[in-house]
Amino acid sequence: MADCYAQDIHGPFETHDFGDFDLEDGGKIRALKLAYATFGTLSPRKDNAILFPTWYSGTSKSIELAYVGPGRALDPEKYFIVLVNQIGNGLSSSPHNTPIPFNGPRFPYVRIGDDVRAQHRLVTEKFGIEKLELVLGASMGAQQTCEWAVRFPAAVQRAAPIAGLSKVTPHNRLLVETFIEAISSDPAFDGGCYADPQAVQRGLRRHARLFAATGFTPSLFNTAGWKKLGFSSADDFVIGFVENHFLGQDPGNLIFQLSKWKAGDVGRNTAGDLKAALARITAKTCVIAIEEDGFFSLKDIAFEQAFIPNSTLQRVSSQWGHLALFGIDPLYNERVDTLLKKLLAS
C-alpha cells in the first residue's frame, strides 16, 4: 500500500516535521508531518504566495495536474504556489503510515481547524510568509479555505472556495455517512483492523460507485460524456476511472478524511454562530459554485456567500458535476482560470 503514496506517483513532494502536534479536541499527533509541493519562486518581499490545500482523496499531484501551469491562473512564473496535503490523505501523517500503536483506527481525531493551524505554521515557520496573496481549495479544500479566512483573516488577502461549504448541511453529512458506510460495511474492513488494505476492495468499489452516481451528473451518463476520456461504456468508465482512483488507497485514510469532512464547521470559531464566523473574513473572496453539483448545492453555497463581506458568487456549469474539479472538463478549467485571474488582478 505504501507504493500508492510514493514519490514516483505523487511527487515530487517534501515533508515538514512539526514534532508533537496538539489537537483541538484533545490528544496529539506524534511527529506530525505535512507533505507539500511548491512551484515557482518566492519573491524577496514574500508577497506572491498562493496556498491550495487538497480535497478528499486528492494529493498535491492531483492539484498540480488540474490547476497549475504556465499561462494558467496559478502560473509558477508569477507566483510561489504551495500545494499542501491535508492530514490523513496518505502523503501527510495518516492512519496507514503512523507507527504502532497510534496507527489505523487508533490514529487521533482531527478537525479541519487542526489542518489549518498546521498549514499556518508551515507557511510562517518554513517559508516566513505572513500574508498569502490567495488561499483557494475545492470541496474539502474549500472547507479549509474558509477556515483559513475565518481563523487567520490578516493572513489571507484573497480567498476562493470552490464547490464547497464552510459548514456541512444535514444532507451533505448524510451523503458522507453513506460513503463511510460503503467502506466500513465490508467485513474485510474489520473495524479498521484489516491486515491487508487490498482485501477491502468490495467496500472501496461500492464507495466508488456511490461517489460516481452523486459526484457526476445524470447528463454525463445519459449522453455518454465519458467517451471523451476514451472509455467504451458507462461501466468501463466507472471501473477504469472512479474505482481505479480509490482502489489503491488505504480505506482507513479515506474514512478518516470523510470523518473530518462531515464535521466541518467554521462556526466552531464563534461558539457555533456561522454568520458571526463568516463576518470575520476580510479577504476579497470569490465563491465559486458548480451549478450541477450534487455534493454542495448552488442554493447552499449562495446562502453562505451572502454572509461573507466583500465577496461575490460566481457560477460555473459542467456536465461533470462536482467532479469537474478534477480538471477533466476544459470549459470548467477555462472558466475557473478566468475567475481566478480576475481575482488575483484585483
Image (cartoon, grey):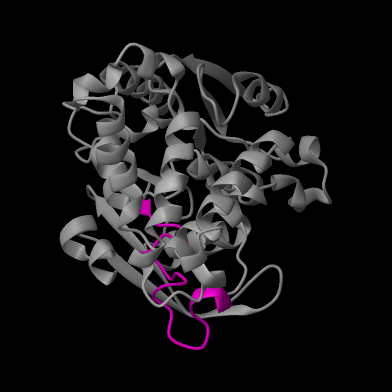
Which one is nearer the viewer's eye here, 219 or 50? Answer: 219
> Going 21% across and 20% down the picture, which residue do you hit?
227
Residue found at the very far bottom of the displayed protein = 101
Q: Position of residue 295 (x, y in %)?
A: 56, 31
Count how many numbered circles sit on residues in the image. 0
Q: Is residue 22 above or below residue 55?
A: below
Q: Quadrant of the image for the C terminus?
A: top left
Does residue 44 appear anywhere in the picture?
Answer: no
Which one is nearer the viewer's eye here, 29 or 202? Answer: 202
> Going 39% across and 75% down the picture, which residue do you hit?
97
Left or right: residue 121 versus residue 280 is left
Q: Position of residue 156 (x, y in %)?
A: 53, 43
Q: Is residue 195 above or below residue 153?
A: below
Q: Is residue 109 above or below residue 30?
A: above
Range of residues picked out in magenta: 83-107
Left or right: residue 45 versus residue 25 is left
Does residue 298 appear anywhere in the picture?
Answer: yes
Whether the magenta-drawn stretch holds residue 134 is answered as: no
- By secondary structure, the bulk of the magenta-drawn segment is best described as loop
Q: Position of residue 344 (x, y in %)?
A: 40, 28
Left or right: residue 294 versus residue 75 is right
> Going 20% across and 26% down the picture, which residue do you hit?
229
Which one is nearer the viewer's eye here, 248 or 72? Answer: 248
Residue found at the very far front of the displayed protein = 187
Q: Quadrant of the image for the N terminus?
A: bottom left
